[in-house]
Structures are given as C-alpha cells and as structure tokens.
Amino acid sequence: MANALDSLYQQVILDHSKQRHGSGLRDGFLAEDHQLNPTCGDEITVRLHGDDALITGISWEGQGCSISMASASILSDLVAEGLSREQLAERIELFRALMHSRGKGIEQDDEPLGDAVVLEGVSKFSARVKCGMLAWVATEHAMTKEHGA
Amino acid sequence: MSSTADLTPTDPITDVEAKQLRNDFPILEQQVNGHPLVYLDSGATSQKPMCVLEDEQDFYEQHNAAVHRGAHTLAAEATELFENARATVARFVGVGADEVVWTSNATEGINLVAYAIGNASAGRGGAAAERFRLREGDEILVTEGEHHANLVPWQELTARTGATLRHIPIEDDGSIDLGRAAELISPRTRLLAVTHISNVTGVINPIEELVALAHASGALVLLDACQSAPHRPLDLRALDVDFAVFSGHKMLAPTGVGVLYGRAELLDALPPFLTGGSMITTVTLEASEYLPAPQRFEAGTQRVSQAIALASAVGYLEAVGMDRIDAWEAELGQRLVRGFEAIDGVRILGPSAGVPRAGLVSVDVDGVHAHDVGQYLDSLGIAVRVGHHCAQPLHRRFGVTASTRASAYLYNTTEDIDAVVAAMGEVRDYFGAK
C-alpha cells in the first residue's frame, strides 16, 4: 500500500500540476472570479465559458502548489464535458464533501467527479484542503456572479 | 534565579549538550509520521522546557490570585511574582522594570505604540504627548523586509494621521544599504520601525548605525526584537532604541505574553491605548486620570501566569548562556546555508554561507512550491515553515510568493540540520522537477 505522501502526490496529480489543462485565460467568458489562499499566497483566476444551457469549459490562470494547480486542471477536464449549472454545482458540492472526508472518501453513483477522485488523498491533510478547493471555490463564486451580472 | 547565571558554563555548546537540553523538552521526544521529530520551526514558535511548564502550573496550584488589587495573602504573593517576573525580563534585555509593558504578543506591542501615537495625534495626552503628534508631511519609515506586524500598524497609523509611510529597500542579499537608508532618513522622519533580525533571511540588521542616523534626524526607533531576544544577548539600552517588542512564545515561554520596552520618559508621555480598569488613578463619570507607565498600558486583567512562565524561560536561557546559544545557532545556521547552497535548484533568500546570520534559512526550490516542499519534509518528521512567513513584500522583492524556512534553536543538533539538508536534496526528484 502506498504511503500517505504517495497517495497525496499520485503521478496523475503531479502530471496535471505540470501539464495544466485549461490554463491560460480565454476571452468570451460568462463570469470570472479570483481566489487567494492568504496563508501561502496561492492564487487563481477562473473564467466560465459556455452558453445559456451549458457551461462548456473553464479557463484559468494561477500560481500555487501542485495540489491547487492539479485540482484546477482536473476541474477543467471535468467541465469540458459540458455541464448544466445544476450539474456543475452538484459536482462542486460532491468534491467539497470528498475534500472534507478526512481520508474516508464518499459514496457516489456513476462517478460524476471523474478523475477528481484522485484528489481524495488530500482530505487526509487538513492543511491542504484549501489548496484542493481553490479552483472549485473560484468556479462556484463565478457562477453566482453570472446571475448578478 | 540570578544565581544560576553565575554557573553558566563557558565551553561552546556541542551536540552532546544540545541532546541533553532536549531532555528538558518532552515534546521533542516523539515520532512524527514514523520518524523522530526534527523540529526546525522555532522561528514561528519555540518548544517549552518542563521547568517553564511546571512554574506556570505551580503558580495556579499555589499562588493564583488577582494582581494589583485585594489585600489578602495570595493577592500579595501573586503581585510579587508578577512584578518579579517583570524585573527579571527587564534585566534580561538591559532595561528598567518600569520600562517593560506586558502585552499579549509583539504584534500587540507594536499596535500599542501605533495607537498611542495616533491618540497623541488626535490631541490626547496633553502637552507631554505633543512630541508624538503626527501631521501631514511627517514620515514613518520601515524596511521592505518587515514582518507584517511591523508594517500594517504603520500603514493604518499613517492613513489615520495623514503622515506618509516610506520604506528602506532591501538589497539582493537581504541586507540594508546604509547609504540608501541615510538618504531616506530626514527631519521629516518621526519614527523608524525596523527588525533586528529578519524572520525570512536571517539577516542581522545594523541597528547601531540605523539608530544613530535616526536620532541625528530627531526620529524615534522601534525595534522588532522577535528573532533576536530569544537567540542572542540583547542590551536594548546599549542599542539605544526607543521602543522594542518581542514575544514570549518564541523564547521557551507560553503563548499570550509579549513585551513592549519603551524608554521611561517616552512611556510616561504617551497617552494610553487600551483603557479601563487597573490603569487609572481617578475616575469620574466624565473623565479619568491615568497611572504612570507601565500600568497605564496594562488595562484589565493581566496575563499573570504567562508572565511568570516567561521569567522562568529567561532563567533557563540565562543558565545555558545567551552568548553560548548565539554561537551554537550561528554554527547551525552556517551548516544549514552551506548544506542548502550545495543542492542544485535550491536558492537561498538572503546572505550566502560565510556571512553572519541567524540560525534560520529560507529557500526557494526551483519547480516545487513551498507547500509541497513542506509536505515532503513533514512526511519524514521534519517540521519547517512554508508560506510567506508574514512578509509578503519581502517575498515579492525576491520574486516568489512563498518559501520554505528552517529555523533552529538551542535544542537543535547538527543531525537535525543534516536531516533537513538531506531531505531537501530529495525534493526536486520526488516532484519530478529535474
């Protein structure tokens, strides 16, 4: 069995932290949000792309640890499938539950979180949960701004 | 306690003695993530020896009562212990007991001075406080390397008073250029707020020279001694600073107690910051008159057990010997910086090996974020600080948002240093950064 560190830093996470899918802000966005983790200075800007029916992608730019960057990259892949706002909000909630599961993971049908489940190891390290959540919180905030705009 | 100072050994501290000292710190004898704990985060907070914990407990078991009020025996005992603690800590830094104000921490000490000056600027404190009044055109000078605690209160004070906040830039090696400092210090400068030792770079600032420059222009000097008071002999009177702050928890004492030093004539002229009980002479429904310093600045129930424990910590440090602790940490600091310098892709923020520095070193690891570095080290039981260490402007100056800091104290050994250096050497490999 892999040790706790290796379960936190799985190869797929390290790969995503280097080959960052969705990285680079694109024009033509619906809303954007900026999030900062003041304890370590990690930051991210997330833009929502899509139409009235679906969010079809996010573009983002950030700097931070491998966990926060990989999490943004994995989220980008997830959203690229095209999700309704309700589906996206539901996945963010599920991911939040996963991050707060203290290493226990969560029950889910049909694997709506896709590759994001590899981040389950983060939930064992309470100090890193914020890193894992950074892009997801930015996306969540951007969605609320969309309605306010 | 004063008798122990006479017994201070004169031989340098070695690994053998450091390992003996560790026996006084039960927390250090544990396994973390399957490895013996290597605690290299004393710059953030130190561990506490048994004698300090016992003295604090003894106060609660034997002497606890409200101080400076009540006439019963316990109240008198508690008051005497509390004031003896003040005298002990004052002597430790070479000042008078009436010049030591208890605070919750160094941050509160700096805020106390900033708010008191703000109150003087608003007209409080009468003629005596006139000398502190800030007006438009006045300047407060800090450095680019300050901890947020010695920056943000001055941002707030200048915003409230219309004065201007300026800063002395930090050089590439973390040092202050005295020529550039001299250009910035002028008759407009009312206060220079500067750290003695940087909590990021370990640089030891030229305080004597800066004080001379400031005083020649009529400016006061506040010294942030958080990283010096715990680690080296400190004589505030000899340094000739006007105010100084440090925290108990970084020098073997509990959290919740810090010290503000102010020259007696300054403290007696400053209006109060926090007001209420215990700091007054006469109170009517309309107005109040205040006690002289230090009580003027100690409103409300004080941190009595913590102050007594801080005096106990001072006794422990003096028994080991501050000059010996200073020399040991200088050795550990050089070993750290030499070790990190030899690792490909690891950049030191601050002076290189051979340059005098404190026993702390911060690094940037190419291709690996500080959070990930810290996580890797923690998996080996090595505790370091990661992040901006409450010094964002200095990190920006070095072109990074975060760094990894190892900071030593008297209980660390060369084995601890070698462990963090060896682990640091593995980090870039683990994360595939090379």
Image (cartoon, helix red, strand yellow):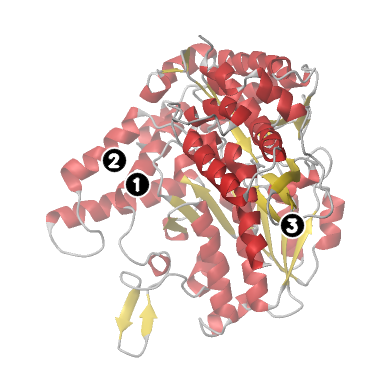
Residue at numbered disc 2: B56
Q: Is residue B388 above or below residue B153?
A: above
**Same subunit under labels 1 and 3?**
no
Q: Report how far apart the C-alphas of labels 1 and 2 lie in the structure.
A: 7 Å
Q: Report how far apart the C-alphas of labels 2 and 3 lie in the structure.
A: 59 Å
**Same subunit under labels 1 and 2?**
yes
Of all chains, the one bearing label 1 is: B
Residue at point 60%, 80% (across, down):
B121
Quadrant including the N terminus of chain B: top left
Of all chains, the one bearing label 2 is: B
Residue B420 seen: yes
- Residue B212: % across, % down: 74, 57
Residue at numbered disc 3: A30
Q: Quadrant of residue B220?
A: bottom right
Whether the residues at callouts 1 and 2 have beta carbons within 8 Å, the answer is yes
Q: Is residue A92 above or below residue B242?
A: above
Q: Report how far apart the C-alphas of labels 1 and 3 lie in the structure.
A: 55 Å
In the picture provided, is A120 more to the left or to the right than B354? left
Residue B360 seen: no
- Residue B71: % across, % down: 15, 63
- Residue B276: % across, % down: 34, 73
Residue at numbered disc 1: B306
- Residue A76: % across, % down: 71, 38
Residue at point 45%, 47% (across, down):
B91
